[in-house]
Amino acid sequence: MVYNKKSHDIYRNVIAPHYDEDGREGGETMRRILILMSLFTLLLGIALPAFSQEMTADEIVRKAEDIMRGSSNVGVMSMHIINPNWERTLEMKYWEKGKDRSLVRITAPAREAGTISLKVENNMWNYLPSVERVIKVEPSMMMQSWMGSDFTNDDLVRESSIVDDYDPTLVGTEVLEEGEAYVLDLVAKPEAPVVWGKITLYIRAEDFAPLRYEYFDEDGEMIRVMYMSDIERIDGRSYPMVWTMVPVKEEGKMTIITVHEIQFDVPIDDNIFNYSNLRRGIVPE
Protein backbone atom coordinates (compact mmCIF):
# COMPACT_ATOMS: atom_id res chain seq x y z
CA MET A 1 0.00 0.00 0.00
CA VAL A 2 1.30 3.47 -0.91
CA TYR A 3 1.57 5.87 2.01
CA ASN A 4 -0.61 8.96 1.65
CA LYS A 5 0.01 11.64 4.29
CA LYS A 6 -3.33 13.37 3.78
CA SER A 7 -5.27 10.14 4.26
CA HIS A 8 -3.12 9.26 7.29
CA ASP A 9 -3.82 12.64 8.91
CA ILE A 10 -7.58 12.25 8.35
CA TYR A 11 -7.48 8.84 10.00
CA ARG A 12 -5.31 10.01 12.91
CA ASN A 13 -7.20 13.25 13.66
CA VAL A 14 -10.79 12.40 12.71
CA ILE A 15 -11.41 8.66 12.71
CA ALA A 16 -9.01 7.20 15.31
CA PRO A 17 -10.20 9.30 18.29
CA HIS A 18 -13.60 7.66 18.02
CA TYR A 19 -12.30 4.12 18.50
CA ASP A 20 -11.45 2.36 21.78
CA GLU A 21 -7.93 1.00 22.31
CA ASP A 22 -9.01 -2.47 21.21
CA GLY A 23 -10.35 -1.07 17.92
CA ARG A 24 -14.05 -0.99 18.69
CA GLU A 25 -16.06 1.93 17.35
CA GLY A 26 -16.36 4.71 19.89
CA GLY A 27 -19.98 5.77 19.56
CA GLU A 28 -22.62 7.27 17.33
CA THR A 29 -20.33 10.06 16.10
CA MET A 30 -18.04 7.60 14.35
CA ARG A 31 -20.97 5.90 12.64
CA ARG A 32 -22.12 9.24 11.22
CA ILE A 33 -18.63 10.10 10.00
CA LEU A 34 -18.32 6.79 8.17
CA ILE A 35 -21.72 7.29 6.53
CA LEU A 36 -20.77 10.80 5.41
CA MET A 37 -17.44 9.60 4.03
CA SER A 38 -19.20 6.83 2.11
CA LEU A 39 -21.66 9.31 0.63
CA PHE A 40 -18.83 11.69 -0.26
CA THR A 41 -16.96 8.89 -2.03
CA LEU A 42 -20.11 7.91 -3.92
CA LEU A 43 -20.71 11.47 -5.06
CA LEU A 44 -17.12 11.76 -6.28
CA GLY A 45 -17.56 8.57 -8.23
CA ILE A 46 -20.62 10.01 -9.96
CA ALA A 47 -19.26 13.49 -10.54
CA LEU A 48 -15.75 12.79 -11.74
CA PRO A 49 -16.69 11.02 -14.99
CA ALA A 50 -18.86 13.98 -15.99
CA PHE A 51 -15.93 16.36 -15.69
CA SER A 52 -13.64 14.01 -17.60
CA GLN A 53 -16.07 13.79 -20.54
CA GLU A 54 -15.63 17.40 -21.65
CA MET A 55 -16.76 17.72 -25.27
CA THR A 56 -14.71 19.07 -28.13
CA ALA A 57 -15.86 21.92 -30.36
CA ASP A 58 -16.32 19.48 -33.23
CA GLU A 59 -18.57 17.23 -31.13
CA ILE A 60 -20.72 20.17 -30.03
CA VAL A 61 -21.23 21.35 -33.61
CA ARG A 62 -22.04 17.83 -34.81
CA LYS A 63 -24.72 17.46 -32.14
CA ALA A 64 -26.30 20.78 -33.18
CA GLU A 65 -26.26 19.86 -36.86
CA ASP A 66 -27.80 16.46 -36.12
CA ILE A 67 -30.66 18.22 -34.34
CA MET A 68 -31.42 20.11 -37.55
CA ARG A 69 -30.99 17.16 -39.93
CA GLY A 70 -31.20 13.66 -38.49
CA SER A 71 -30.70 10.86 -41.01
CA SER A 72 -33.80 12.17 -42.80
CA ASN A 73 -36.61 14.63 -42.19
CA VAL A 74 -39.93 15.73 -43.67
CA GLY A 75 -41.48 19.07 -42.80
CA VAL A 76 -44.20 21.59 -43.53
CA MET A 77 -43.21 25.24 -43.17
CA SER A 78 -44.04 28.78 -44.18
CA MET A 79 -41.72 31.61 -45.19
CA HIS A 80 -42.74 35.21 -44.48
CA ILE A 81 -40.63 37.71 -46.45
CA ILE A 82 -40.57 41.29 -45.13
CA ASN A 83 -39.27 44.22 -47.16
CA PRO A 84 -39.73 47.95 -46.50
CA ASN A 85 -42.25 48.22 -49.36
CA TRP A 86 -43.92 44.81 -49.47
CA GLU A 87 -44.49 41.49 -47.71
CA ARG A 88 -45.50 38.03 -48.85
CA THR A 89 -45.78 34.50 -47.48
CA LEU A 90 -44.90 31.19 -49.12
CA GLU A 91 -46.03 27.80 -47.85
CA MET A 92 -43.97 24.72 -48.62
CA LYS A 93 -43.20 21.10 -47.91
CA TYR A 94 -39.67 19.82 -47.42
CA TRP A 95 -37.91 16.45 -47.77
CA GLU A 96 -34.28 15.77 -46.84
CA LYS A 97 -32.30 12.52 -46.80
CA GLY A 98 -28.74 12.57 -45.52
CA LYS A 99 -26.59 15.53 -46.61
CA ASP A 100 -26.79 14.89 -50.36
CA ARG A 101 -30.49 14.92 -51.22
CA SER A 102 -33.21 17.45 -50.51
CA LEU A 103 -36.33 18.85 -52.14
CA VAL A 104 -38.53 21.87 -51.40
CA ARG A 105 -41.98 22.19 -53.02
CA ILE A 106 -44.02 25.38 -52.75
CA THR A 107 -47.70 24.69 -52.04
CA ALA A 108 -49.04 28.28 -51.83
CA PRO A 109 -49.80 30.91 -53.04
CA ALA A 110 -51.30 29.61 -56.26
CA ARG A 111 -48.97 31.67 -58.46
CA GLU A 112 -45.88 29.83 -57.16
CA ALA A 113 -47.51 26.51 -56.21
CA GLY A 114 -45.66 23.53 -57.68
CA THR A 115 -42.31 25.31 -57.89
CA ILE A 116 -39.62 22.86 -56.78
CA SER A 117 -35.98 23.14 -55.74
CA LEU A 118 -34.14 19.81 -55.94
CA LYS A 119 -30.62 19.08 -54.79
CA VAL A 120 -28.79 15.81 -55.46
CA GLU A 121 -25.16 15.71 -54.31
CA ASN A 122 -23.52 18.83 -55.81
CA ASN A 123 -26.28 19.56 -58.34
CA MET A 124 -29.36 21.74 -57.91
CA TRP A 125 -32.34 22.40 -60.18
CA ASN A 126 -35.47 24.54 -60.01
CA TYR A 127 -38.68 23.35 -61.66
CA LEU A 128 -41.00 26.16 -62.82
CA PRO A 129 -44.52 24.82 -63.45
CA SER A 130 -45.70 28.00 -65.21
CA VAL A 131 -43.38 27.25 -68.12
CA GLU A 132 -42.94 23.52 -67.41
CA ARG A 133 -39.20 23.96 -67.40
CA VAL A 134 -36.27 22.76 -65.31
CA ILE A 135 -33.43 25.24 -64.74
CA LYS A 136 -30.07 24.11 -63.41
CA VAL A 137 -28.69 26.27 -60.61
CA GLU A 138 -24.99 26.76 -61.25
CA PRO A 139 -22.55 26.78 -58.30
CA SER A 140 -22.05 30.52 -58.79
CA MET A 141 -25.78 31.01 -58.13
CA MET A 142 -25.95 29.09 -54.83
CA MET A 143 -25.62 32.29 -52.78
CA GLN A 144 -28.36 34.13 -54.68
CA SER A 145 -31.68 34.88 -53.00
CA TRP A 146 -34.26 32.09 -53.00
CA MET A 147 -37.70 33.35 -54.10
CA GLY A 148 -36.79 36.93 -53.14
CA SER A 149 -36.08 36.04 -49.49
CA ASP A 150 -33.06 36.65 -47.27
CA PHE A 151 -32.29 32.92 -47.50
CA THR A 152 -30.10 31.72 -50.35
CA ASN A 153 -30.37 28.68 -52.61
CA ASP A 154 -27.66 27.13 -50.45
CA ASP A 155 -29.65 27.75 -47.24
CA LEU A 156 -32.79 26.08 -48.54
CA VAL A 157 -31.13 22.89 -49.71
CA ARG A 158 -28.24 23.14 -47.23
CA GLU A 159 -25.71 22.36 -49.93
CA SER A 160 -22.82 23.15 -47.61
CA SER A 161 -22.26 21.51 -44.23
CA ILE A 162 -20.77 23.36 -41.29
CA VAL A 163 -19.35 20.05 -40.07
CA ASP A 164 -17.53 19.29 -43.32
CA ASP A 165 -16.61 22.78 -44.50
CA TYR A 166 -15.56 24.61 -41.33
CA ASP A 167 -13.03 24.19 -38.51
CA PRO A 168 -14.75 24.96 -35.18
CA THR A 169 -13.17 26.52 -32.08
CA LEU A 170 -14.93 26.83 -28.74
CA VAL A 171 -14.28 30.43 -27.64
CA GLY A 172 -16.39 30.47 -24.47
CA THR A 173 -19.94 30.60 -23.15
CA GLU A 174 -22.57 33.30 -23.01
CA VAL A 175 -25.89 33.55 -21.20
CA LEU A 176 -28.69 34.31 -23.64
CA GLU A 177 -32.43 34.66 -23.03
CA GLU A 178 -32.85 30.98 -23.94
CA GLY A 179 -30.14 29.84 -21.49
CA GLU A 180 -26.38 29.38 -21.29
CA ALA A 181 -24.84 28.81 -24.70
CA TYR A 182 -21.56 27.58 -26.10
CA VAL A 183 -20.01 30.17 -28.42
CA LEU A 184 -18.05 28.70 -31.32
CA ASP A 185 -16.15 30.30 -34.17
CA LEU A 186 -16.27 28.23 -37.35
CA VAL A 187 -13.60 29.23 -39.87
CA ALA A 188 -13.95 28.03 -43.45
CA LYS A 189 -11.46 25.38 -44.53
CA PRO A 190 -9.15 26.63 -47.31
CA GLU A 191 -10.48 24.10 -49.84
CA ALA A 192 -14.17 24.40 -48.89
CA PRO A 193 -16.52 25.75 -51.61
CA VAL A 194 -18.24 28.26 -49.32
CA VAL A 195 -18.81 32.01 -49.33
CA TRP A 196 -18.79 32.72 -45.59
CA GLY A 197 -15.32 33.18 -44.19
CA LYS A 198 -16.53 32.59 -40.64
CA ILE A 199 -19.72 31.64 -38.83
CA THR A 200 -20.16 32.29 -35.11
CA LEU A 201 -22.56 29.75 -33.69
CA TYR A 202 -24.40 29.85 -30.35
CA ILE A 203 -25.52 26.42 -29.11
CA ARG A 204 -27.54 25.93 -25.92
CA ALA A 205 -25.43 23.96 -23.46
CA GLU A 206 -28.23 21.93 -21.88
CA ASP A 207 -29.55 20.29 -25.07
CA PHE A 208 -27.37 21.46 -28.01
CA ALA A 209 -30.21 23.40 -29.64
CA PRO A 210 -28.76 25.99 -32.08
CA LEU A 211 -29.77 29.49 -31.00
CA ARG A 212 -27.99 31.91 -33.33
CA TYR A 213 -25.81 31.97 -36.43
CA GLU A 214 -23.71 35.04 -37.29
CA TYR A 215 -22.34 35.05 -40.84
CA PHE A 216 -19.13 36.91 -41.76
CA ASP A 217 -17.55 37.51 -45.15
CA GLU A 218 -13.90 36.80 -45.98
CA ASP A 219 -12.92 40.23 -44.61
CA GLY A 220 -14.46 39.48 -41.22
CA GLU A 221 -17.49 41.75 -41.66
CA MET A 222 -20.82 40.50 -40.32
CA ILE A 223 -23.36 40.27 -43.16
CA ARG A 224 -26.39 38.61 -41.60
CA VAL A 225 -27.70 36.94 -38.44
CA MET A 226 -30.14 34.05 -38.09
CA TYR A 227 -32.03 33.76 -34.81
CA MET A 228 -33.50 30.38 -33.81
CA SER A 229 -36.44 30.45 -31.41
CA ASP A 230 -39.61 28.69 -30.20
CA ILE A 231 -37.69 25.52 -29.33
CA GLU A 232 -39.86 22.43 -28.96
CA ARG A 233 -39.08 18.84 -28.01
CA ILE A 234 -39.62 16.72 -31.15
CA ASP A 235 -38.55 13.11 -31.68
CA GLY A 236 -36.13 13.34 -28.75
CA ARG A 237 -34.42 16.54 -29.91
CA SER A 238 -34.77 20.24 -29.05
CA TYR A 239 -35.75 21.76 -32.36
CA PRO A 240 -36.18 25.50 -33.11
CA MET A 241 -39.51 26.02 -34.87
CA VAL A 242 -38.86 29.62 -35.96
CA TRP A 243 -35.80 30.83 -37.93
CA THR A 244 -35.44 34.57 -38.48
CA MET A 245 -32.81 35.73 -40.99
CA VAL A 246 -31.83 39.40 -40.71
CA PRO A 247 -29.41 41.12 -43.12
CA VAL A 248 -27.27 43.45 -41.01
CA LYS A 249 -26.98 46.33 -43.49
CA GLU A 250 -30.48 46.29 -44.99
CA GLU A 251 -32.82 48.02 -42.59
CA GLY A 252 -36.41 46.85 -42.56
CA LYS A 253 -35.66 43.50 -44.20
CA MET A 254 -36.01 40.04 -42.70
CA THR A 255 -37.32 36.59 -43.56
CA ILE A 256 -39.06 34.35 -41.04
CA ILE A 257 -39.40 30.60 -41.54
CA THR A 258 -41.93 28.91 -39.29
CA VAL A 259 -41.87 25.12 -39.09
CA HIS A 260 -45.41 23.81 -38.62
CA GLU A 261 -44.70 20.07 -38.83
CA ILE A 262 -41.44 18.09 -38.77
CA GLN A 263 -40.58 14.39 -38.52
CA PHE A 264 -37.10 12.92 -38.26
CA ASP A 265 -35.49 9.63 -39.26
CA VAL A 266 -38.47 8.58 -41.37
CA PRO A 267 -38.31 6.40 -44.54
CA ILE A 268 -38.25 8.54 -47.71
CA ASP A 269 -38.64 7.04 -51.18
CA ASP A 270 -35.55 7.83 -53.28
CA ASN A 271 -37.88 8.53 -56.22
CA ILE A 272 -38.71 11.87 -54.60
CA PHE A 273 -35.21 13.02 -55.55
CA ASN A 274 -35.39 11.69 -59.12
CA TYR A 275 -34.35 14.29 -61.70
CA SER A 276 -36.23 12.49 -64.49
CA ASN A 277 -39.47 12.78 -62.54
CA LEU A 278 -38.78 16.47 -62.04
CA ARG A 279 -38.40 16.98 -65.79
CA ARG A 280 -41.73 15.24 -66.42
CA GLY A 281 -43.43 17.45 -63.86
CA ILE A 282 -44.06 14.57 -61.47
CA VAL A 283 -43.94 16.21 -58.04
CA PRO A 284 -44.31 14.62 -54.57
CA GLU A 285 -47.40 15.32 -52.51
Image (cartoon, rainbow, N blue to C red):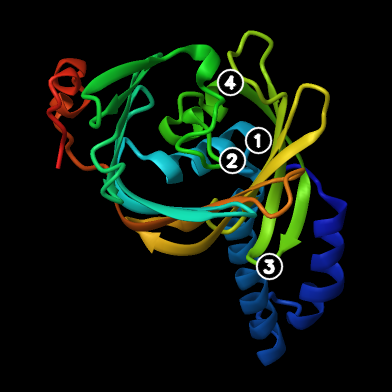
Q: Earlier in the sequence, mark 1 or mark 3?
A: 1
Q: Amino acid at mark 4?
A: Asp
Q: Quadrant of residue 59?
A: top right
The nearer-to-camera label among 1 and 3 is 3
First reached walking from the N terminus: tag 4 or tag 1: 1
Residue bearing the label numbered 2: 60
Q: Quadrant of residue 43?
A: bottom right
- Check disc 3 and report the residue beneath it: 177
Which one is in front, 102 or 249? 249
Residue at 31% over, 42% down: 112
* Residue labelled with disc 4: 165
Residue 252 coordinates in the image, percent (x, y) = 69, 55
Task: Tell me, yes or no, if residue 88 can be seen here.
Answer: yes
The answer to whether the residue labelled 2 contacts the one labelled 1, judged by CB atoms less than 8 Å apart, is yes
In the image shown, does 48 or 98 lie closer to the viewer?
Answer: 98
**Label 1 is placed on what type of residue?**
Ala
Q: Are marks 4 and 1 in contact (CB under 8 Å)?
A: no
How many numbered marks have been drawn onto this rendered protein structure?
4
Identity of the residue drawn at 70% across and 76% down: 22
Q: In terms of sequence position, does the residue under pointer 2 or pointer 3 come before the other?
A: 2
Task: Identify whether 5 is placed above or below 54.
Answer: below
